[in-house]
Image (spheres, rainbow, N blue to C red):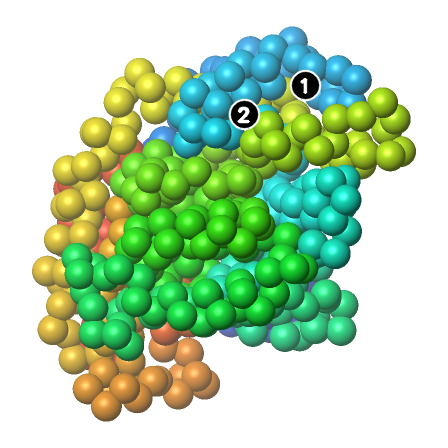
Amino acid sequence: MSHVVGKEAMRIWHPCTQMKDHENYPPVFIDRGQGIYLYDREGRAYIDAISSWWVNLFGHANPRITRAVGEQLARLEHVIFAGCTHGPAEELATRLLAVVPAGLSRVFFADNGSCAVEAALKMSHASWRNLGHPEKCRFIYLTNGYHGETAGALGVCGDALYAAPFAPLVVPQIEVAGPVCHACPCGKTRQTCQAECFGPMQAAIEANAEVLSGIIIEPLVQCAGNFHMHPPAYLSRLRRAATAAGCHLIADEIAVGFGRTGTMFACEQADVSPDFLCLSKGITSGTLPLSCVLTTDAVFDAFYHDYAEDKAFLHSHSYTGNPLACAAACETLRIFEEDDVIAANKPKIAHLQAAVRERFAGHRHVSDIRSTGWITAVSLAADPEKGTAFDGRERTGFRIYREAIKRGAWLRNLGDMIYFMPPYVITLEEIDKLTDIAFDAVEAVLG
Ligand code: PMP
């Protein structure tokens, strides 16, 4: 297939894409991947700076994961997960329960992040219903929060870009202004913060206490919602408030779990254990789709009953607990353990954060640089001093993304923000190369 252009040629409708852009920029045909690199058919290499939508941890075509999946493929590729269990799922449950915050004791599998969120919301409400509180059916979420794009997940989406166009299809939940730490209204720093901005959350919890099923949050980093980052103090306070109000805390660690924030799970930094923990993305190191919801005995027990119709959690996906995906996840967790990945990541994280600051701090169009663990985001503005954004029609971020592709880095923008979230196998030299490319791409557009 040659590089086709024009509407007629577009048989494939790509996600989160204005398809007309492909008239000028045909999709890059990626032929293979190796480590942190993606290769197109002409053999050009691109550093996968955003880990293929934040999923890849240990590099493309990772030999250990490839072997584990291959061995499983020869044994059992898939089986219905109602009434059956299998080795990879059993091992994965054991491995997960050994590393998640204490108190989580049950694992429910699904196959993508949005569906894990759907399952957690449904499970939360259904557990209250089973316990005689059907009125507990509302959820609080934060402005700028993002939890996926299925209809239920859009009900707790605090980013209008994704939610507003589908408003008539969605049951709206309760939005609360969350922390905006890069411009803290309380004048605090990360070090001095005691979650002084918690007022609106406390008020919303009190106003809705009777009907509240749970509060959902992306711990420490709101990724898709412009990389707003908050310190652990906010999360600790939220845990205490949820407990006091008698509602669930749902931690969506789909993006931040498995080491992205520097610890295995972001909740650890606040010494918090949620009632629900949603995981996906890095769980298979980006090899195969898999997600899960971990929860407590208290929630599990609310469904335990003699008759399915009465109290069972009637929710299923055909590919639930897929053995290949579970095998990839088991190998991912083995790598974490055997290679002491969380400790080994520390110098790389420090180097990445420093390298980005070195290149972008003080740049005339940089309004903010923020980092948590492996995630570093650079906000660009027409005039950072005056707080003037670029004209959206200039598509500044998109043009930088295209310039970075030309220079060999897959650095997909988020509006006028560029961010770095590379696979953990990147080397210090490759971090320097990536940040140089990013700088050159920014200069090519704004210089
Ligand atoms: N929650 C968070 C925090 C996410 O970042 C995402 C995906 N970006 C999702 C949920 C949805 O996951 P998926 O794309 O697999 O449906």
Q: Is residue 103 toward the left or the right of residue 8 in the image?
A: left
352 is higher (above) or lower (below) than 60: below
Q: How many marks?
A: 2
Q: Dot 1, crowdedness within 10 Å: few (<14), some or many (≥20)?
A: some
396 is higher (above) or lower (below) than 66: below
In which quadrant of the rendered view does residue 196 lie? Answer: bottom left
Q: Nearer the viewer, residue 440 or 219?
A: 219
Secondary structure of residue under mark 2: loop
Name the residue: 15% across, 45% down.
Answer: 350
* Residue 163 shows in this picture: yes
Q: Nearer the viewer, residue 137 or 10?
A: 137
The amino acid sitting under disc 1 is Glu
3D distance between C-alphas at marks 2 and 1: 27 Å
The amino acid sitting under disc 2 is Ser
Disc number at residue 7?
Answer: none
Q: Nearer the viewer, residue 377 or 269?
A: 269
